[in-house]
């Protein structure tokens, strides 16, 4: 006699449903908005910003040439092709992905969803309609102060 147990339809769909739900949950946890923050950035701009960069320090060497940029204190600091310094929040206002500075296009760009912003932080394209927070810069000798 064959003692093979057969699974009824309800048991089958119940087992499949639990497995699919667990798999979906695992995938969603890996792509949650909070996990997009590769470096602790968020779509909200830092407040109370006030720090100084020593332009002679090797860590800040990207600012030695026009078109260079770096990230510091959740702020993207760039040197324009004209040689002036600008500073904006480091993350896109659409989601928390870091921005890059494209000096040849005089803009900030989000590699993830394609949002673009002028050097003054104004949205020019992409899935966001919120401008970037822009910070003041002040150069004194080889010290660059970035502040709100």
Image (cartoon, rainbow, N blue to C red):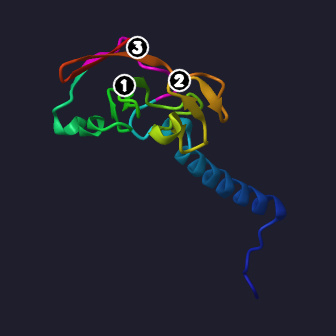
Compared with 4, 139 (above or below) is above
Which mark lies nearer to you, 1 or 2? 1
- Residue at 46% in and 18% down: 134
Left or right, 102 with respect to 31, comes to left
In depth, the one of 117 and 72 nearer the eye is 117
Name the chief secondary structure element in magenta: loop
Q: Using the rendered view, name the quadrant where residue 59 is placed.
A: top left
Residue 57 position (above or below residue 148): below
Look at the image and say whether residue 95 sits in the magenta stretch: no
Q: Residue at x 56, y 27 (%)?
A: 93
In x, y percent, where is residue 89?
A: 44, 25
In percent of width and height, residue 49 lies at 34, 15
The residue positioned farthest toward the bottom in the image shown: 1
Q: Position of residue 48 (x, y in %)?
A: 36, 11
Q: Are the two marked residues, 1 and 3, in contact with CB atoms closer than 8 angstroms? A: no
If you read the primary sequence from the N terminus, does the residue marked by circle 1 or circle 3 appear first?
3
Q: Is residue 45 magenta?
A: yes
* Residue lying furthest front: 82
Q: Quadrant of the N terminus?
A: bottom right
* Residue stretch in magenta: 42-51
Instruction: State the quadrant of the C terminus.
Output: top left
Residue denoted by label 3: 47
Q: CA distance from mark 1 to mark 3?
A: 23 Å
Label 2 vs 3, first from the N-terminus: 3
Q: Residues within 10 Å of mark 3 (few under 14, many from 20)?
A: few
For label 1, the residue is 84
- Which numbered disc flags the more N-terminal residue, 1 or 2? 1
Q: Position of residue 16 (x, y in %)?
A: 72, 60
């Amino acid at each position: 006699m064959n003692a093979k147990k057969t699974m009824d339809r309800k048991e089958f769909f119940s087992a499949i449903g639990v497995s699919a739900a667990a798999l979906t949950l695992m995938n969603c946890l890996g792509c949650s908005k909070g996990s997009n923050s590769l470096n602790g950035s968020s779509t909200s701009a830092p407040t109370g910003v006030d720090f100084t960069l020593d332009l002679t320090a090797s860590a800040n060497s990207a600012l030695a040439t026009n078109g260079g940029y770096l990230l510091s204190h959740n702020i993207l600091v760039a040197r324009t092709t004209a040689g002036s310094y600008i500073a904006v929040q480091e993350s896109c206002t659409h989601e928390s992905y870091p921005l890059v500075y494209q000096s040849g296009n005089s803009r900030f760009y989000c590699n993830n969803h394609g949002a673009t912003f002028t050097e003054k932080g104004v949205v020019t394209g992409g899935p966001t309609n919120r401008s970037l927070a822009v910070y003041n810069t002040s150069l004194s000798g080889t010290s660059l102060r970035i502040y709100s």
